[in-house]
Amino acid sequence: MAIQILFHLSLLLLILLSPPPTTANLEGDALYALRRAVNDPHNVLQSWDPTLVDPCTWFHVTCDSDNRVTRLDLGNAKLYGKIVPELGKLERLQYLELYMNKLVGPIPNELGGLKNLVSLDLYHNNLTGSIPPSLSSLSNLRFLRLNGNRLTGRIPRELTKLGNLKILDVSNNDLCGTIPTSGSFSKFTEESFVNNPKLEGPELMGFVRYDAGGCN
C-alpha cells in the first residue's frame, strides 16, 4: 500500500512539475505548418526543428525578449507552396517577409489577425484570389506590397481605413473595378496600381462610383 501511495504521489509531482504548453510552442507549431506547406529546395528551413522548445533559435525567425516571434524573413528563399492560415497565430509578428518566392494560392484571411504587423511583403509570387478585406484590421501596417502576383477582384474599400499606411503597391496583378481614393488611399499615386488591365480608374469627384467598374 505504501508503495502504491508513493507511486501516486510521484506521478502527481511529475504532473505538477511538467511545464504547461507555452505560447512559444504554439508559435513554433504555426511556423512548422508553413514548413510543411512549402517545398524548400535550398534547405533554408533546415533549422526549423519542431522538437525544440521554441522557434527563436531557427534561422530567419526573430523573437522579442519574451520569446515571441516578431519577424519572419523568408524573402527570395526560392520557396514554393502555400501561405498557411496558421501564421495568423503569431500575435506579435511585425514583419512578414515572403517576397520573391513561388508561393501560390490565396492570401489567408487569418493574416488580418496580426494586430502588430508593420510590414506585409508578399510581392513577386504567384498568389491568386482576392485581397482579403480582413487586412483592414492591421491598424499598425505601414507597408503593404502585393505587386507582381495574380490577384483578382476589387481592391477592398476597407483598406482605406489603414491610417498608418505609407507604401501601397498592388501593381502587376489582375485586379478590377475602380480605385478607392478616400482615407489613406488619397496619397497614393498611379504607380501603386499600374498594370492591372481591368482597373477602370479612381473614384474622382464622384464621377466614378466604387461599384461601377466591371469586375468579371
Image: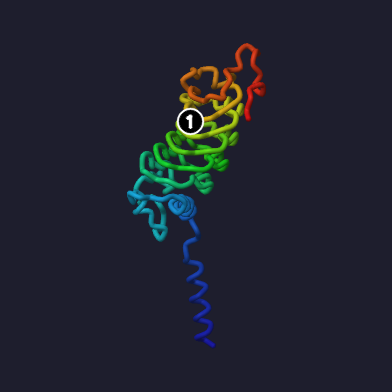
Residue drawn at x 64%, y 16% is 208
Is residue 172 in sight in this rendering?
yes
Q: Which of 119 and 15 is in front in this view?
A: 119
Q: Which residue is drawn at 66% across and 21% down?
A: 212
Circle 1 crowding by C-alpha within 10 Å: few under 14, some 14–19, many from 20: some
Q: Position of residue 118 (x, y in %)?
A: 46, 33
Position of residue 88 relative to residue 151, above or below, is below
Q: Can residue 23 be seen in this view?
A: no
Quickly name the residue at label 1: 144
Residue 169 pos. (x, y %): 47, 27
Query: In the image, 132: left or right of 100?
Result: right
> Mark 1: which secondary structure?
strand
Quarter containing the C terminus = top right
- Name which residue lies at 49% across and 28% down: 170
- Classify the position of the N terminus by image quarter: bottom right
Q: Quadrant of residue 106?
A: top right
Residue 63 shown left or right of residue 131 in the figure: left
Tell me, what colour scheme is on the image?
rainbow
- Residue under the point 48% across and 71% down: 14
Image check: 213 left or right of 96? right
Looking at the rendered structure, the kind of residue marked 1 is Leu
Q: Which of 126 and 25 is in front in this view?
A: 126
- Image coordinates of residue 202 in percent, x first then y, are 58, 17
- Image height of 185 relative to 12, above or below: above
Q: Nearer the viewer, residue 28 or 11?
A: 28
